Image (tube, rainbow, N blue to C red):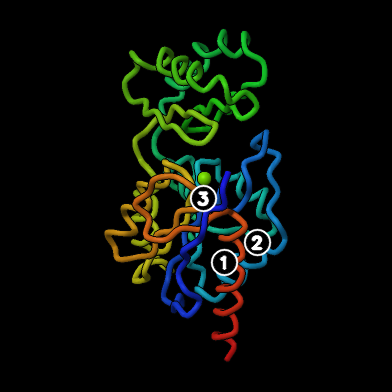
Amino acid sequence: MSELSSSLPPLSFDLSNMAVFLDFDGTLVDIAERPDAVIVAPATKRAMDQLSTTLSGALAIVTGRNISDIDRFLEPLHLPVAGVHGLERRSHGGALSAYPVDAALLESVAERLAPFLAAEKGLLLERKRSSIALHYRARPELKDACVAAIDRATDDLGGIHILRGKMVIEAKAGSSNKGDAIDAFLGEPPFAGRVPLFAGDDVTDEDAFAVVNRRGGISIKVGPGETSASYRAGSIDDFLGWLELIADDLERANGA
Ligand SMILES: [Mg+2]
């Protein structure tokens, strides 16, 4: 694959009044063979710690993961998080809000998928409170079969929303998305009154780019693919390098 060049906001950009929202997988860490095998680099944690401090806490993770997973990966940081693509959210003050979920509905999706999972090795079914995710990272050739299996398992069920991401197909028990989560954060302190910046890598991040663009913020696509984002990082490393530089810059400006 050829190198994709980056067009990131210049370092002279004043980020001091920004609210920063970051996707996790494919943005802060590489997609690993198993979802639990990712590791956040110490330099990345340090940059997020700096940013959170200099932005008065206006830094949040907006992810498809469970909130508890993000806490574990980012330890000792404990940031505001929107989990499961906006179906769950923890505010800066620590208040949890979650979309009401029909657990029996998700249970029946899992039961219907069981024979497919038993027949194909290497697939992983991840149960979250508000969704079921079918990961095929270890069997990428099964993508179409996985899409068909999820469709079969859900096509007569109301209230289920299908989301296709990188190496994963997800059945969500609600329609909230990452854009809704950013809107909700921006209605609360310390995010309210700030200009949003969001970085993400996947098709599921386009809802967030749309909200950020509408609000006159900065949208950054990480890696290849069509996007409505206004900036692009060619790779995760390019993005993290930029994030570390602006975190240092902001910290210096704050201390001056
Ligand atoms: Mg991602």
Q: Count neighbours of disc 3 (C-alpha within 10 A) and say few if under 14, some if 14 to 19, many if 20 or more.
A: many
Q: Is mark 1 within 8 Å of ligand 1?
A: no
Q: Between 111 and 166, which is closer to the camera in this rendering?
A: 166
Answer with mark 1 or mark 3, whichever residue precedes in sequence.
Answer: 3
Q: What number is the disc on residue 223?
A: 3
Mark 3 is on which residue type?
Gly
Task: Find residue 243 and name its label.
Answer: 1
In the picture provided, is 105 more to the left or to the right than 78?
A: left
From the top left corner, tell me how far across and down residue 92 is, in percent. 49, 61
Q: Residue at x 47, y 56 (%)?
A: 199
Residue 59 or residue 98, whichever sits in front: 59
Residue at 48% over, 19% down: 144
Q: Is residue 93 visible?
A: no
Number of numbered discs overlaid on the protein picture: 3
Task: Describe the element under mark 2 as helix, strand or loop.
Answer: helix
Residues at marks 3 and 2, CA–CA distance in whole angstroms:
18 Å
Q: Is residue 85 above or below residue 220?
A: above
Quadrant in the picture for residue 254: bottom right
Q: Position of residue 119 (x, y in %)?
A: 62, 8
Q: Does the beta carbon at disc 2 come under 8 Å from ligand 1?
A: no
Q: Is residue 248 above or below residue 61?
A: below
Tell me the residue that label 2 is attached to. Answer: 44
- Of callouts 3 and 2, the N-terminal one: 2
Position above or below: 173 against 179: above
Query: What's the residue type where badge 2 is placed?
Result: Thr
Q: Nearer the viewer, mark 3 or mark 2?
A: 3
Number of other residues with Cα within 10 Å of mark 2, as a class: few under 14, some 14 to 19, many 20 or more: some
Return the x and y of residue 166 as percentages of the image width and height.
Answer: 52, 36
Cβ at disc 3 under 8 Å from ligand 1: no
Which numbered disc, 1 or 2, marks the residue that appears first in the sequence? 2
Instruction: Locate the N terminus and report the quarter of the image it occupies.
Output: top right
Residue appearing at x 33%, y 13% in the figure: 156
